[in-house]
Image (spheres, grey):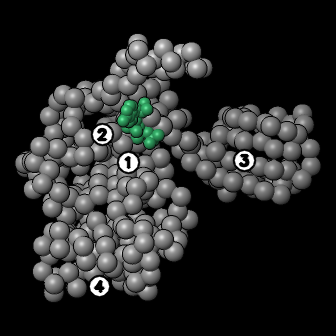
Amino acid sequence: MMPVIDVKHLTKTYKTYKRGAGMGQTFKSFFQREEVMVHAVNDISFAIEQGEICGILGPNGAGKSTAIKMLCGALYPTSGEIQVLGYSPARDRKRYVGKIGAVFGQKSQLIWDIPPIDSFNMNRAIYGIATPDFKSRLEELTELLDIAHVIEKPTRVLSLGERMKCEFVMAMLHQPDILFLDEPTIGLDVIAKVKIREFVHQMNKKQNMTCILTTHDLEDVEELAHRVIVINHGEKVFDDSLQRLKLFLGEKKRVSFTFSESVQGTVFDNAYTKVIDRPSDFQITLEVDTAYISISDFLEDISRKHRFSDISVKELPIQQVVMNIYENAGGY
Ligand SMILES: Nc1ncnc2c1ncn2[C@@H]1O[C@H](COP(=O)(O)OP(=O)(O)OP(=O)(O)O)[C@@H](O)[C@H]1O
């Protein structure tokens, strides 16, 4: 089977100019500008089959947005090749945009001062969607996302969660084959995140829609992606299944406690826990290997020894994930 997305040796280098600090340097830079090359994406290759949901992970500045912008056709690559559904995204942009949908968490496609329904109608005209198709599709999408009651209010009064759901409707009305998502759940509460993930799942199942997703949120990946590509400093450092990523991660979680009593002098390090941070005698953050002890047994163990007033359990931060992948690079 031909992949729907085929990327070969993709590279994007931005040219910027260095500016010195202070007035004198700024003045000087008017006449003598020092060029700086930023290798945002550096020789990345991958292929994606129809119906795959692929998460692109990486720390800040890794090159995720640059890669997804090139895949959407919004940026020309410096070198390398991209074929999506047989199109070259930037070159064939006019024909290509009808085949894809995009939701960028940091950038709205909706027009601020008018209700989403008017923006949806605009897309109906742009993509030439027949009115009956548009109506039934709109009904289906708004029902799935539970936003039928908000689409006639001006966009600017909507909550972030409501607006993001409308962004998804906007991106999906013309039934794209591929959906590109750049940080789609950023800033959303848990309920909105779950709803949006469910929605992507349903679209993927029902229409065999392919989805590429960049995120900092490991939960997005855990809930959605079959496959994960990790990039760091513009280079691909991991490309495999979510199961393999979990092997690299280990079964580790970060647990932070605020104790009701001082735990000064107590030793927390042992075979399955490592102290990550100890900002005061009352607070501690531990990394717990849940392959050795379940979170519930661990919490029971701690609560038997110390009283605590607050606790949070989190996945490892993405920087740590990337580091673990580097440390295990030989095994990959
Ligand atoms: N228009 C631009 N001109 C110059 N440099 C840029 C431009 N856009 C991005 N960069 C640089 O390219 C690198 C990759 O940026 P990019 O936005 O693709 O990263 P990212 O992985 O999406 O990061 P984040 O998670 O913080 O959004 C960064 O060093 C960034 O500063």
Q: Camera-side residue: 237 or 112?
A: 112
* Label 4 – label 1 distance at C-alpha: 28 Å
- What amino acid type is highlighted by mark number 4? Glu
* Residue at figure coordinates x 15%, y 60% from the top left: 99
Does residue 141 appear anywhere in the picture? no
Residue 133 rendering spot, x and y as whole percentages:
16, 82
- Marks 1/2 in contact by CB < 8 Å: the verdict is yes
Query: Tag 2, which secondary structure?
Result: helix
Does the CB distance between marks 2 and 3 fall below 8 Å? no
131 is higher (above) or lower (below) than 282: below
Helix, strand or loop for disc 1: strand
* Ligand 1 within 8 Å of the CB at mark 1: yes
Q: Position of residue 310 (x, y in %)?
A: 78, 56
The residue that mark 1 highlights is 214
Q: Are marks 4 and 1 in contact (CB under 8 Å)?
A: no
Q: CA distance from mark 3 to mark 1?
A: 27 Å
